[in-house]
Image: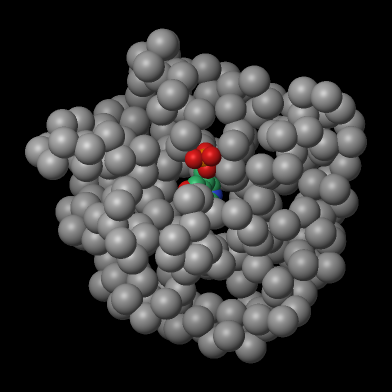
Amino acid sequence: MTRLSVNINKVATIRNARGGNVPDVLKVAMDCELFGAQGITVHPRPDERHIRYADVRALKPLVTTEFNIEGNPQPEFIKLVLEVKPHQVTLVPDAPDALTSNQGWDTIKHASFLKQVIAEFHQHGIRTSIFVDPIPEMARAAADTGTDRVELYTESYATRFFNNPEEAIAPFVETARAAYAAGLGINAGHDLSLDNLTYFVKHIPNLLEVSIGHALISEALYLGLQETIRRYLQALQ
Ligand code: PXP
């Protein structure tokens, strides 16, 4: 079964709007697990406008499922990940001022850099995943970096899904096939929601994990967190 990792950045964004500790990010993470989520994802950015580095440190002893830290492997981020030692680090080439992750790695152009940081994470026993666009060559070249997994960047799927689901999914099927053939595990994320998740999971075999934040937290405003997570788990079955 594909595992659900809840990205709690949005919860931190709401908290940061008032400067206090409401909502309590740590409690939300633990409740997500209580409600059945199989992982917690955080994406610390250099300006800490969403999750903060201190949150990531505080989460480490509390998270009992899989802890996944995403981000651009710049020196401060690498230092944090090596200190916290999550189960998985997902490498994302996002610029510091990007509103959200907006592209996958060019795994050919950045091969030597990726190889070097992946080796460092592996030395500390941390599984690695590389965020990639739905392009088979990018998945194949990702395998040459030594990474364990790729995370398929699903924004284009989500955007095109309502008009033409078959066309929207096609590049993801091809890229997932290429990744699997190259021996990589497959994760996916960005703009996945209760509306588009079932179709995605149905068409991408061997999908190990999805990380979902924005839609899940937005849907929870109407459904509540427990019911929302229940529906995601059902969609993933
Ligand atoms: N994967 C990566 C690499 C991301 O940067 C994000 C957003 O921070 C997600 C997945 C989750 O995207 P969303 O918040 O749209 O569910």
Q: Residue at x 44, y 24 (%)?
A: 218
Q: Is residue 20 above or below residue 96?
A: above
Q: Position of residue 106 (x, y in %)?
A: 70, 72
Colour mapping: one colour
Image quadrant in which the N terminus is located: top right
Q: Residue at x 37, y 76 (%)?
A: 78
Q: Is residue 57 above or below residue 63?
A: below
Q: Is residue 147 above or below residue 192?
A: below
Instruction: Give the left or right position of residue 20, taking residue 50 as reference.
Output: left
Residue 190, quarter of the rendered image: top right
Q: Position of residue 153 (x, y in %)?
A: 66, 50
Residue 76, quarter of the rendered image: bottom left
Image quadrant in which the C terminus is located: top right
Q: Residue at x 80, y 47 (%)?
A: 172
Res 149 seen here: no
Which residue ends up furthest to the front in the rendered image?
97
Instruction: Give the left or right position of residue 59, taking residue 99 as reference.
Output: left
Q: Position of residue 112 (x, y in %)?
A: 63, 88
Instruction: Give the left or right position of residue 22, taking residue 148 as reference.
Output: left
Q: Position of residue 152 (x, y in %)?
A: 68, 52
Res 41 seen here: yes
Which residue ends up furthest to the top in the rendered image?
222
Q: Nearer the viewer, residue 9 or 99?
A: 99
Instruction: Give the left or right position of residue 105, taking residue 83 as reference.
Output: right
Count the numbered circles shown: 0
Q: Is residue 42 above or below residue 57?
A: above
Q: Residue at x 35, y 58 (%)?
A: 44
